[in-house]
Amino acid sequence: MRPQKIIEAKRDGAELTREQIDSFIEGVCDDSWADYQTAALLMAMFTRGLSQAEQDALTYAMLHSGVILDLSGIEGPKVDKHSTGGVGDKTSLVIAPIVAACGGTVPMISGRGLGHTGGTLDKLESIPGYNVNLSCEGFREVLKMCGYAMSGQTSDIAPADKKLYALRDATATVPYLPLIVSSIMSKKLAEGLDALVLDVKSGSGAFMKREGDARDLAAAMVRTGEAFGVKTQAIISNMAQPLGAFVGNALEVYECVRILQGETEPAWRDTAELSFELAAHMLVLSDLSGGMDKARSRVEEAVNSGEALAKFSKNCELQGGDPKVCEKPERVFEESLVRVPIKAPAPGYISGVDALAIGDGVVALGGGRLKAEDDVDHAVGFRCDVKVGEEVREGDLLGEIYCRTDEQGATVLAAFQTAYTITPEPVVASILIIDVI
């Protein structure tokens, strides 16, 4: 089919047929569609809208533009978790070894950070030697040997998505629900899953800042997963403030290993709470537990017994990383970093910790990227010492910047300071888990 006819149809408000959408995705993959033609159709989809049938057809075509992993030869239900991204969102590193320790198989294909949101692959690469570029066969082997594998998207998996996302980013057509759903779900469905749990963030540090938008996205992805034969559930979680104690790749790895070691600190309690709850939902959804109470107990047992940490160590070894990080997580730190304190300017109660401001501050330090080709400084970041609802005195430590030089710290100091709002009256602590869809 000629690209011009398909573009014209959607431009004029027609509903595209499955054959037209298949032709479009084939043209994207074999380069018979020029980038300007693809961009034109994406803009027409954005402005004219897509029906449910069109969204399903687009997801199907993108899913089948590459391979679907065949994991039938690997024991255990295949279950994964996907997060829509946030600041300090590090739960994958805790969840995957826990679920693997409980009998699940977790084929986690992850991404890199872009903008203020961090990426699982960047966190893992702060572990010396860790290889996130596994072939499909290497991915299967790691899964067989330790129950979970973590890798980037290969050129074989949903290749249409990579091209489409780059053009959506360049043409300001990213924030459209059907295109978001087809992008996320085509990659996740390609993992050959039995079950999928989605962590949909809402708040200043989330992609969906309004709770209503987060609910719409969660419902759409759950419906799509179920329509494609994968048991799917979504949790709406709060991203109005950073998750846990640390923001920054190596720092977040440190926090996750400490949690897997069974350690608890007030500032990272929410990381543990959300990770454990998501893991429990994964166990229930994949029939590894009879109910949430039993699943929560099994998750805690996997951590307290050391089973989950052992899985993390085995995975590090298999993917080329340094397993000694599991014994001494401070090995991921760079001792030469300069630490710049952020102190409370007045007494009162923390009424807000702007996740977006802190995420942007870490990017300004070099800990994130504004363009896909940017390099990342894995070591730099920020430590959040207080949370919404806590009382502080003037001069109390709110957090600490981890940076290369005093001069670098000075350039972002004001941004981190203004992220904190202090009021004289007590404030109710934020709800971490808003709802389950």
Image (cartoon, helix red, strand yellow):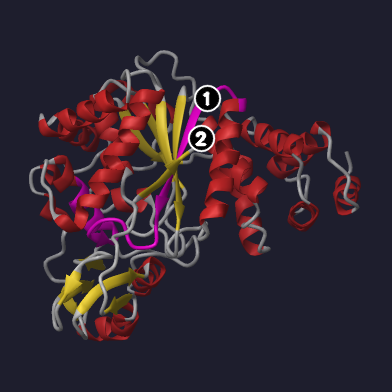
Q: Are marks 2 and 1 in contact (CB under 8 Å)?
A: yes
Look at 32% across and 69% down and name the residue there. 353
Is 265 in the magenta?
A: no
Question: Where on the picture, by quarter, is residue 23?
Answer: top right
Q: CA distance from mark 2 to mark 1?
A: 10 Å
| x and y, in percent, of residue 131 in the image | 32, 42
Magenta-highlighted residues: 227-256
| Vertical position of residue 315 compared to residue 435: above or below | above
Look at 44% across and 14% down and name the residue there. 72
Nearer the observer, disc 2 or disc 1? 1
Q: Residue furthest left?
A: 327
Q: Nearer the viewer, residue 232 or 67?
A: 232
Q: Is residue 418 shown left or right of residue 212?
A: left
**Residue designated by label 2:** 188
Look at 18% across and 52% down and name the residue there. 254
| x and y, in percent, of residue 259 in the image | 17, 45
Amino acid type at circle 2 is Lys
| x and y, in percent, of residue 337 in the image | 17, 72
Q: Is residue 2 shown left or right of residue 337?
A: right
Indicate which disc residue 230 carries: 1
Indicate which disc residue 144 carries: none
Amino acid type at circle 1 is Val
Q: Is residue 116 shown left or right of residue 125?
A: right
Instruction: Evaluate whether residue 208 shows in this view.
Output: yes
Question: Where on the picture, by quarter, is residue 104?
Answer: top left
Look at 34% across and 51% down and name the residue there. 432
Indicate the secondary structure of the residue bearing disc 2.
Answer: helix
Question: Where on the picture, by quarter, is residue 426?
Answer: bottom left
Q: Nearer the viewer, residue 124 or 60?
A: 60
Instruction: Evaluate whether residue 138 shows in this view.
Output: no
